[in-house]
Every structure is written in structure tokens, then in C-alpha cells.
Image: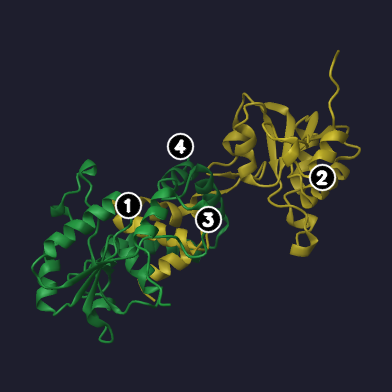
Chain colours: A yellow, B green
Amino acid sequence: MTTLDLLVQNLSRLPGIGRKSASRIAYYLLKADRSYLATVARQIAELPDRIRSCSVCGNYTEEDPCSVCADPRRDRTVLCVVEQPQDVQTIDATNEYHGLFHVLQGVLSPIDGMGPEKLNLAGLLERVRREGVREVIIATNPTVEGDTTGLYVVRLLKGSGVAVSRLASGLPVGGDLEYADRTTLARSLKGRTPLST
Amino acid sequence: MTTLDLLVQNLSRLPGIGRKSASRIAYYLLKADRSYLATVARQIAELPDRIRSCSVCGNYTEEDPCSVCADPRRDRTVLCVVEQPQDVQTIDATNEYHGLFHVLQGVLSPIDGMGPEKLNLAGLLERVRREGVREVIIATNPTVEGDTTGLYVVRLLKGSGVAVSRLASGLPVGGDLEYADRTTLARSLKGRTPLST
């Protein structure tokens, strides 16, 4: 196989990149300037050395603790429990949440061999107790695995005296009743919010 | 900016990769094993040193002349003129073409400052004369620029005695008349093929 074929093969392993996109990217790289190629290559190669898990929340970070945990302006009494490091950014981007995070680094999934011992759960209860957390928001995905993991966290926090909530599930904003699936619609009915009259 | 932000920014420059895909890829890379990262990084960095243009046809290659030009089983009397190196693979994948290629490395596009002097045209006439080419197939894209470039090549070959043809334009196989655009339908009418009765 040629260098180009090998690169295409390796690029096709990336998420969302099929053979055609990989080939398109490879040909783009062939035309790109050397400094760009050198920079991207260095950034990829150095990734495992520069980025690790925050010892407090489990988020990816270059400094330990991470910038979120170290931010003094954040409300340290609220903790948002998410599955993946990327969820931290997603929730932060709403500008509606100013508390801290706890990254589980996965979800419970017996089929994939993901038991509770593989999740970043050990530090959670300790954080809640030590740091004076008042509320834990479960923000795992609204999937079977995410819901199961959420329930597991709820059980873990039982007796800790902390308020626990779950992200609302329902119709996406801008969506259309007609195109909502039955489960989502059922959840949005069950979780309907009262309006003042 | 963090290492991760910088990598996401650089990955978003790739074709077909927006900010979201770039971020997804970056998080995938964070979980990937070191040897994969090292290999991809090396392949990207070494690209400009390992791959150059074939001095005969203009295709990307590691050896000069390229494997297509050097292949003794190919029909050296037919030459297919394409815009980009990736078009060589695309046409080869049909298994219907067994001749040689000539890669223009671009199309005529005055707006983008692409004049004939920037295309790999110099060697074309010489190849046709020297190598005993009988037919030149113009396989530029069926776009305004591709068609213009094709016409330019036709004019260039005038008087060389070689037969010149153009890839057929028309309805895509498996397509539906209802969804065909007017221009494509008009071309497929104009280029209709006679059937024996």
C-alpha cells in the first residue's frame, strides 16, 4: 500500500469519516502547506502527553485541577454529572449553568462490559460531602444506558442529603409535534410544566 | 487557547469537517492508543516529503513516473484528461478504462486567477505526439469551469490528428427523471444514444 492509501485507511477510523471523506481529507492535506501539516501532526502526536484527566472532576485537562474546577467564579454548591468530557463544553455553551461538573467517563452498559467500577464514581460521593454541594443535576444522555446510569447515581447519593434533579426530557425547541417520536412525546407529557394563569 | 482547542481549530480546516465534527474527532483522538496517534501524525508530517507530482502525467506519486504511467499492461494509445489526481482513482475504480491519464491539477477559472499557464498542459501535446496517442478523453467535471477547460484542451489538440471525446453527461444511473435538474435533462436529450430496433 502507498503512503496515501495508508493515511486514508487510518483517517477512515475517525468518527464520522468514511472512505470517501478520508480520501478527500488526504488529498486536501497533499495540497496544504508544510507548516499546517507539521502543526497538526505535532498536536496529534503530543495529545496523550499533554492531556490527562482532572483528578477532581474527571474532565480532560492540561492542568490539574482543570480550569472549570479551578474557576473561583463558579457556584461550588451545584454539581452536574455528565457522561463524557465533551458534555462539559456542550452544557457550558448554554450559558445557563455556572456550577461544577463531574465526568463519569462512560455509562453503565453490561453488554459492553461497563460496570460501575469502570466509571469515575469513586470521587463523587466524597466531593458532595466535602465540598458542601447542595444540588446534583444528572445530565446523562436520555438513553437507556444514560437513564440507568442516572438512577445508579441517584441511589449512590441516597442519604447524603443532597437535592438531585435530572435534565428535562421532551420536545426539542423549534421541533414539530408531527415529527416527535412517541417516547419523546410521552416523556414531554409526563414531564409537562405547569403554567400560571 | 488549550491544546485541544487548537487541534479542533486546525481540524475544522479540513474539507467536510465543521466545528462539531472536528471536536468529535479530537475527543476520539484523546481516547485513541498512542501508536495510532504516532502513526497518523508521522504520515501527515511526512506527506510533502514522500509524495510529489508524476513528471509524466501530473498525478500524485511516491515514485516517478507513477505506477499508472509505469504499468506495462495499460493501453498507451488512450489518454484521459482529468482535473485532479483523485479523479484518476475514481475513473480507475470503474474498471472500464485501461488507458493512461493526464492530470491538469486544476481547471480554468479566471475569477480564481487560474489561467492556462497554471494548469499542467505543457506536457500534454508532447505526450500525444511522442507516445502515439490515438484518442484523448476529456474527463473534466461537467461544470462551467470543467467544460471551459475541456474546450481549451480540444483547441490545444487541434491539428494533432488525435481523436478527442468527452465523458457523456446525462441522467445518473438509478436516478429518477422527476428529480433531474433541467440542465442535466436537456443534456441527456441532446446526447441521446440511438437504439437498434
Q: A145 above or below B166?
A: above
Does residue B120 appear anywhere in the picture? no
Q: Are marks 4 and 3 in contact (CB under 8 Å)?
A: no
Chain identifier of the residue bearing label 2 in the image: A
Name the amino acid, label 2: Thr
Disc nearest the viewer among 2 and 4: 2
Does residue B84 appear anywhere in the picture? yes
Q: Position of residue A121 (x, y in %)?
A: 76, 48
The residue tagged 3 is B29
Name the secondary structure under disc 1: loop
Name the amino acid, label 1: Thr
Q: Position of residue B51 (x, y in %)?
A: 28, 66
Name the amino acid, label 3: Leu
Q: CA distance from mark 1 to mark 3?
A: 38 Å
Q: CA distance from mark 4 to mark 3?
A: 18 Å
Q: CA distance from mark 4 to mark 1?
A: 41 Å
